[in-house]
Amino acid sequence: MPGLVVFGRRWAIGSDDFVLPGAFELFIRLVWWIGILVLYAVHKGQFNCPGGGLLHSYLLVLLILLAFTICVLSALVYISMQGTISNPGPRKSLPKLLYTRLLLYLPEFIWAVLGAVWVSDSSVHCEKTVINVIMVTVIASWVIIIFTIIGVLIVFDPLGGKKTFYFTDGVNRNLESSQSGQLLYNVKNTATRVWEKRIRLLCCCIVQDDDHRVAFTSIAELFRNYFSDTDLVPSDIAAGLTLLHQEQDKMESCLKEPEEVLCHSPSSPVTDDLDIELENAAHYMLFAAAAYGWPYYIYTNPFTALCKLSGDCCGNRPTDSDITGSDRHNFHFGSILKITGLQYRDFIHISFHNKIYEIPFFVALDHKKEAIVVAVRGTLSFEDILTDLSADCEDLTLEDVLENGFVHKGITQAANYIYRKLINDGILNQAFTIAPEYKLMIVGHSLGGGTASILAIMLRNSFPTLRCYAFSPPGGLLSKSLADYTKHFIVSVIVGKDLVARLSMPNMEDLKRRIVRIVANCNRPKYQILLRGCWYEVFGGDPDNFPTELDGRNQDALTRPLLAEESLMVQRSPSYNALEDESHLNSPPQYPRLYLPGKIIHIVEESSSRRLCSSDIKYTARWSNETVFSSILISPKMVTDHMPDVVLKALNSLSQEHGSCIPC
């Protein structure tokens, strides 16, 4: 629902968000009140000790104060339970109750101070049990006050004052006037500065230079554009994701339309091609995973990794390989050696240098496949996250390539950095001098997969036989023309419902639109949606069939947004408009639709059998295309399916299955 407006400003909390925290505090207050009442009843008439008179008055006032608080909390929780997310009308009296509840904090604070003074007074010689109970009461009061202050800080919206005016008067304002235009400009500038401060605070531990400042501004504008056109609070988004997940599960349980994939029979040439690619992908995924260094090795070998690395990596640094960047105790290099199974002499260059737009990579000789492998690391640091989030589009201009188009700005700059190192520093020349008959292979996972793909496009003219395997690359990477061009030399591997492979600004805008629609049209209170959603995520069961305002409407009505939906959309961002406006060729959006690189292998979980100490998962793979990944799927596996160990496990399972079938 729209953010709650109190004290003349908007807050990042809805009027229906007080049910669960209010009920929890109400339970604490009830137990507290009963305990004080029992204490007072048991010790009634026994307050003759030094300081007992003050204690008697303290307990009486505390009982009355707690009773008032319990009544106000009960009314607050009850009112907050009324209505739906998009229908706050039954909750219009909640701000008054909230003001009353906040006023009660003043006497509660004063009484907490008096209690602390009484407990610390050395002249008080009452029964020890009474003193301990009062001490617990004082501590509980301070804990509740502190948590309330923290909660206020969390839901405080720095733009609340400006948003209140903008949201309430935005429909009736004449945006053609210079005054309203200046107001809108000031709101956008303020929002950008707020997001930039948040990003700087999150990245306070890294050294910041001009590249960082440019990236901060670019990312801040991206967040401002994305969040500025809706009036949703975080709990609305959580409820929307819960509803979308259950809706998707219901659709999957029904008969599905056939995916737009290249189907094949078990004996077709396409199957043989797929099996070969899966075998190669399983092999090269080791290199892509090894690029993560010791974090990946310890993550996959939590009990033995440290012992092995400490025993093997504390010796002298090998001088045969060209190593740049920090690698304390040789843990990174030792992990790469153990994961790939290569020798020291097989590495041409290893870079652990990491800055924004400059990511680690290594170049090695793979004698098994007779290839020179360039492996690029995925996201592992704040600098890498900034590179990921620099999602503006820029042109990729290459000689003798007609299919020029848009690419992801941050990833393209990372690819340019590696390209300069490989060519200008003569790293590839050195590698081909050692093994002139070997072919060039570029691999990477996640951010590394996207960087490897664009790097492969840059090197394609110089190395026509080049091949690239991109594991779980970002979805918003290449324009359609470049994506089609890369189908001849790039293979992307996607597992399940991987979120990153579906990440692009148009897909994020589509997700926002779906959240707004399903939240605005649900006829259940938010607390019921969240409680049922938590139960469904933890314990499973059948998806809940939440009634919505969509039920019973004809098809023509379904194409028009409902009033509740329109109330949650303040204005539409450029990329949001592009989703529905088919004439966007004349006025391109800020974030055009970008696609996955190359041919796409989609690996899905076919069946899963869980045993006492392990689980046996069977995978199936098929050729797919970019349209299958044009929508973000909500699932608990949307993150785990992206992890490199899961990708490697799926590829190894398919490769072993194919190997066991060859003798048959």
Image: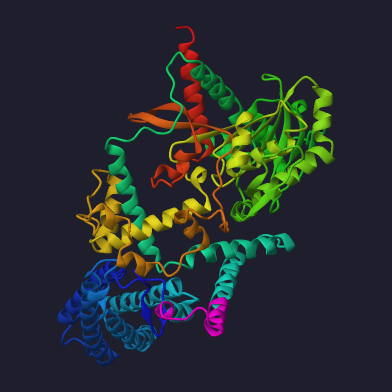
- Residue at 64% x, 41% y is 377
Q: Nearer the viewer, residue 302 or 415?
A: 415
Identified at 50% across, 38% down, the residue is 626
Judge by depth and name the residue closer to the eye, 320 or 633. 633
Number of marks in the image? Answer: 0
**Residue 238 position in % (x across, y down):** 37, 58
Residue 148 lies in quadrant: bottom left
Residue beneath the point at 20% across and 78% down = 39
Q: Quadrant of residue 332?
A: top right
Displayed quadrant of residue 42: bottom left
The answer to whether any part of residue 334 appears in the image is yes
User: Is 536 situated above or below 42?
Assistant: above
**295 w.r.t. 392: above or below:** above
Residue visible at 77% across and 26% down in the picture: 345
x, y percentage for residue 363?
A: 73, 33
220 left or right of 519?
right
- The magenta stretch is 168-186
Q: Is residue 289 above or below residue 510?
A: above
Residue 172 belongs to the span the image colors magenta:
yes
Residue 188: give x, y in percent of width and height: 55, 73
Up/down of 553 relative to 119, above or below? above
Quadrant containing the N terminus in the rendered view: bottom left
Specify whether residue 258 is painted magenta: no
In the picture, measured across the screen, residue 223 lies left or right of residue 422, that is left
Classify residue 479 as left or right of residue 100: right
The residue closer to the viewer here, 391 or 372, is 391
Which quadrant does the C terminus fall into?
top left
Residue 482: x percent and y percent? 63, 40
